[in-house]
């Protein structure tokens, strides 16, 4: 298992934008699923967006489709989450995760992701 380091969180007003970054290192393969999850206080962790590297196939939660974009820079081993039109309900701790094995059951099967970052806080005020 490798390491993941997130950055880019912060506080914005509703309608604003943020870009999160997740730098990956130490993985045995460049073929992996990379995903962003988020967790609000008192709620379960939920998947937001995912990408299969290096192919670039993506998946999104319905709640963020059309507003969030996940992308990759293979040369930098970094995945990004561009978040536009942010809403107060987007508030939470955002975690980057990686899975080297196939994900049976969809992009956001928690048990499939073995490597996690430390998280970065996103706060959206109304």
Image: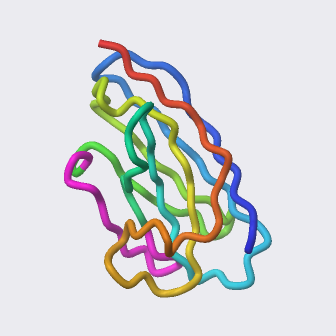
Place of residue 37 in the rendered image (x, y in percent of width and height, measured from the top left): 45, 52
Q: Is residue 96 left or right of residue 75?
A: left
Tell me the quarter of the image containing the C terminus.
top left
Residue farthest to the front?
Answer: 42
> Is 56 a magenta residue?
yes
Place of residue 47 in the rendered image (x, y in percent of width and height, measured from the top left): 38, 56
Q: What residue appears at the point 33 percent right and 35 percent down from the top-left corner?
A: 84
Q: Which residues are magenta?
A: 51-64
Residue farthest to the right?
Answer: 26
Q: Nearer the viewer, residue 56 or 46?
A: 46
Up-down: is 36 above or below 40? below
Q: What residue appears at the point 56 percent right and 75 percent down from the top-left corner?
A: 99
Q: Is residue 83 left or right of residue 29?
A: left
Place of residue 75 in the rendered image (x, y in percent of width and height, measured from the top left): 67, 68
Up-down: is 83 above or below 56? above
Q: What residue appears at the point 26 percent right and 43 percent down from the top-left corner?
A: 67
Tell me the quarter of the image containing the N terminus.
bottom right
Place of residue 63 in the rendered image (x, y in percent of width and height, measured from the top left): 22, 46
Up-down: is 80 above or below 59? above
Q: What residue appears at the point 36 percent right and 71 percent down from the top-left corner?
A: 107
- Count of residue discs: 0
Up-down: is 112 above or below 21? below
Residue farthest to the top?
Answer: 126
> Is 22 a magenta residue?
no
């Amino acid at each position: 298992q490798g390491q993941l380091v997130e950055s880019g969180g912060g506080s914005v007003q509703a309608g604003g934008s943020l870009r999160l970054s997740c730098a990956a290192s130490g993985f045995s393969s460049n073929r992996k699923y990379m995903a962003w999850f988020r967790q609000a206080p008192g709620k379960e962790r939920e998947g937001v967006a995912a990408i299969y590297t290096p192919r670039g196939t993506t998946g999104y939660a319905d709640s963020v489709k059309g507003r969030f974009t996940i992308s990759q820079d293979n040369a930098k081993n970094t995945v990004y989450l561009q978040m536009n039109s942010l809403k107060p309900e987007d508030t939470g701790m955002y975690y980057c995760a990686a899975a080297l094995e196939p994900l049976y059951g969809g992009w956001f099967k928690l048990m499939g992701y073995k490597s996690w970052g430390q998280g970065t806080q996103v706060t959206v005020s109304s």
